[in-house]
Image: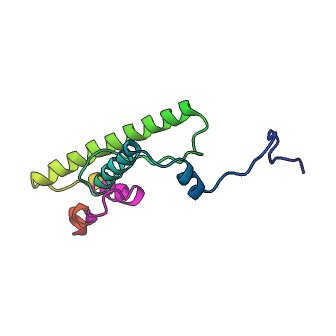
Amino acid sequence: MRETNNLHVVDTSPLITPTQLKRELPISECAAETVAATRDTIRAILLGEDNRLLAVVGPCSIHDVDAARDYAERRVAEHYAEFKRLAEIGRTLINSAPLTVEAAETVRRLEREDFCFPDLDPAWARPPADR
């Protein structure tokens, strides 16, 4: 079997522990405020108090910035299209019109695929024959 590990590694050196790093480079007041404000923003997004989309990307996940940007742009466009469709469905319900089978399937698919609406009860989205 051909060797695949560390083919281009010239040297290694051990890293210091997180505790040592914190001791040697304590957080500044500005950095602490940034961390706290960012946590508050993320909390608001997760609680639905802020309508922005939160994308969590690990630091090792991106090796090609252009590809990552392209992926993110496509995902945002997909979510926006789904949001617009869900808004149309909501307007239908507000007007007391029955949902089409297609609209009910859209809601069920969104719940199943994204589960981004944990408080949404998909029972209201059943076609009239299923109620």
Location of residue 122 (image quadrant): bottom left
Image position, residue 16 (x, y; %): 65, 53
Q: Nearer the viewer, residue 114 or 49?
A: 49
Image position, residue 97 (x, y; %): 13, 53
**Left or right of residue 69, residue 21 in this image:** right
- Which residue occupies the extreme left position in the image? 95
Q: Is residue 5 magenta?
A: no
The residue at the point 26 percent across, 54 percent down is: 48
The residue at the point 57 percent across, 51 percent down is: 21
Image position, residue 14 (x, y; %): 73, 51
Q: Nearer the viewer, residue 105 or 36?
A: 36
Location of residue 74 (image quadrant): top left
- Which residue occupies the extreme top position in the image? 66
**Left or right of residue 19, residue 50 in this image:** left
The residue at the point 37 percent across, 56 percent down is: 109
Q: Nearer the viewer, residue 70 or 94?
A: 70
- Which residue occupies the extreme right position in the image? 1
Q: Nearer the viewer, residue 48 or 42?
A: 42
**Left or right of residue 4, residue 126 in this image:** left
Applied colour scheme: rainbow
**For residue 52, above or below residue 101:** above
- Which residue occupies the extreme bottom position in the image? 131
* Count of numbered tags: 0
The residue at the point 31 percent across, 52 percent down is: 40
**Left or right of residue 86, residue 98 in this image:** left
Image position, residue 111 (x, y; %): 35, 59
The part of the chain drawn in magenta is 104-122
- Quadrant of the drawing holding the C terminus: bottom left
